[in-house]
Amino acid sequence: MNRLKVITTLMKQKNLKNYLEIGVHNAHILFRIKSTFKIAIDPKFAFDTARKIGKTILNPFNLYNQYFEKTSDDFFADDASKVIGNKKIEISLIDGMHQYDYALRDIENTLKYLSDDGVIIIHDCNPQTKAASGTWDEWQSRNEEGFWNGDVWKAIVHLRSTRKDINVFVLNCDHGLGVVTKSKPENVLNLTPDEIVKMQYEAFDADRKDLINLKPVDYFYEYFSVK
Ligand SMILES: C[S@@+](CC[C@H](N)C(=O)[O-])C[C@H]1O[C@@H](n2cnc3c(N)ncnc32)[C@H](O)[C@@H]1O
């Protein structure tokens, strides 16, 4: 199971169409999505016109892509209300700057435009090492090889502590896929933002199942009643 499979399964079986992706890179996911309403945001897209044309031949829905080469904060400040208008976002992948504050803003901003039955997927919520789990500055100063997840997990803990109007869990696959729906939370935490900022990887690791509401992959099929 990975983010592409989760997104395409939900789009097909739950009839979710309008797609927003924050943090697109080479558009490995975006270019595969079949929808006539796709918004792509990244301050630096990692693809050229030739790739765009090639991917549009393979998937003509890419003709409809709306590209915003800017930060997600700038997109929400300058463009979101015009571009999304009366439409609602029905499915979103949040995979931009992998830091607590940025990821939290991306999720909260996306929630403002999300349909009642919409789903937000957040990549990189379940880091497996201390090195992978910190801020960008920490990761760079360590100069390590490998995969940086960042502290997106703190945004999940934050939402589980502060929002009583959404349900949040993390699927145990693909570096941890956060899932947010507009429904009653299964359970909540009562940590303050100050406690979350100070929380270290060791505390997260000791209690990750409860902190991020970690679920096995099968839970995805059960929760959404999909096959
Ligand atoms: C891990 S990549 C995204 C991968 C892609 N979603 C996928 O699934 O293949 C993260 C991307 O986030 C972008 N990014 C960094 N800061 C951002 C910001 N403030 N707003 C939006 N995107 C950002 C980076 O330029 C980078 O391309």
Image (cartoon, grey):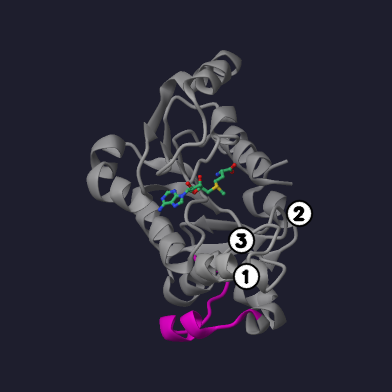
Mark 2 → mark 3, Cα distance in angstroms: 23 Å
Query: Residue at coordinates 60% horizontally, 41% vertically from top-left?
Result: 7
- Label 2: which residue? 218
Amino acid beneath label 2: Asp
The answer to whether any part of residue 68 appears in the image is: yes
Query: Where 71 falls versus 153 (above or below)?
Result: above
- Quick check: 173 left or right of 87? right
Residue 220, image x, y percentages: 68, 52
- Quick check: 115 left or right of 226? left
Label annotation for residue 149: 3
State the residue in front, 201 or 226. Answer: 201
Q: Which residue lies most toward the top here?
A: 57
Amino acid beneath label 1: Arg
- The dominant secondary structure in magenta is loop
Q: Is residue 194 covered in magenta? A: yes
- Label 1: which residue? 142
Rendering quarter of residue 204: bottom right
Query: Residue at coordinates 49% horizontally, 22% vertically from top-left?
Result: 62
Mark 1 → mark 3, Cα distance in angstroms: 14 Å
Residue 31, image x, y percentages: 55, 28
Q: Locate the C terminus by quadrant.
A: top right
Q: Residues within 10 Å of mark 2 (few under 14, many from 20)?
A: few
